[in-house]
Image (cartoon, helix red, strand yellow):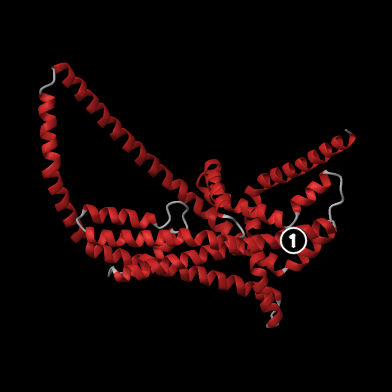
Amino acid sequence: MKQAYKMALRAAAVLAGLCTVIIAAAVTFPFLYPFYAAAFLAYFLNPSVNLLAGRFRLPRSLAAAFMLILLLLAAASALLYILAETASGIKYLASVFPFYLKHFLIYVNSFFTSHVVPFGDKLTELFNALEEGHKQTILSNLQSAGENMILQAGNWISRLLNALPLYLSYMPGLTSTFFITLMATFFISKDWYKLVGYLRKKIPQPLSARFHTVAEEMKKAFSGLIKAQFYLIILTIFMSYIGLLILRIPHSLTIALLIGLMDLIPFVGSGIIFLPWIAYLLLSGGSRLASGLGTLFLLVMITRQLMEPKLMSQSAGVAPLPALIAIFAGYRIFGIGGLFAGPLFIVLLNALYRAGVFQSVWLYISGKNPK
């Protein structure tokens, strides 16, 4: 009985400590998130900074600045390339849009003439055969539905126009946050080992060692997760590019890159590009090209579904079923952001398990000395 009471007290202490950490993180996050992001970025840049500072004998401040500049140049180059390809794609769409619009309108006119008009005539006959009271009820309901649709459309446009100034007002804050994050990343990276040494002096050695192990496991898991997604995106881009070349689609590389980018979105993925495209081709009479795109879409989806579990298990150490459960639960709890937060939470739990944190906590609760 006494042992059970002590175990309950230790379990309550662990729970209270966990709640304190979670509450502290939630309270401080809105004020300190640029510095959290900077610490995370500096941690992943640290091996490259160490390489420049060690092998090339550069001062650590210069090595940290060089890596940040290199990262910014890479991001800017990617953004400029995307903008250039987008402009080229828009120019191409502007040149071919009238042709496709003409064929689409011809198809709509033919469909309207052959199907909608006869159906409308039948409805008119049925309507004329009704009693006057029923006619008035139907007309009243149709008028009410039309007014409601117009009201809803007006409300949607009004909300959109009201939201634009709000989103634009975020730009100064986002810009300042961006530069603060860059500066904080530079200073944290420059003084990385000074900060680590200071924390090690303040934190007890067993806890410090456990934290280091968790950090290393997290680094391996996140690196593996990023690597797995990178391989999957490259595979999607390659297959899409080859398939689009075979189908003789103009700007195949740009479209394949866009498909690879959309592949990052959970659940929908590359379907956000393929499905509307295939639907449009079917409606406009391009059934041959639609069947080719449908076959390509199925090949891309099947290959990704076959490769993803293996890559995720090998690279990130996360089984497919827990990852799927985490994605669904994250979406239900946090919305769109939960699609990304869920898998990250699973990666964190997996890292804690591999680092032996759960075993140490249980040993503490049961009254044994954790190693």
**Left or right position of 366 against 191:** right
Q: State which quarter of the image contains the C terminus.
A: bottom right
Look at mark 1 in the image and give the residue it sits on. 213
Residue drawn 55% across the image and 45% down it? 330
Residue located farthest toward the right when viewing the structure as drawn:
2
Whether residue 184 can be seen here: no
Q: Residue furthest bottom?
A: 56
- Kind of element beneath mark 1: helix
Residue placed most toward the observer, 342 or 318: 318
Could you tell me which residue is drawn at 54 percent across and 69 percent down? Answer: 72
Q: Position of residue 88 (x, y in %)?
A: 32, 68
Q: Nearer the viewer, residue 329 or 291?
A: 291
The residue at 75%/41% (across/down) is 15
**Please, is residue 217 above or below residue 150 in the view?**
below
Question: What percent of the width, then of the height, locates residue 335?
Answer: 51, 44
- Of residue 201 and residue 294, the one placed in the foreground of this image is 294
How busy is the neighbourhood of tag 1: few (under 14 within 10 Å), some, or many (20 plus)? some
Q: Is residue 351 above or below residue 12?
A: below
Instruction: Locate residue 268, reporting x and y percent.
Output: 42, 52
**Residue type, numbered disc 1:** Thr
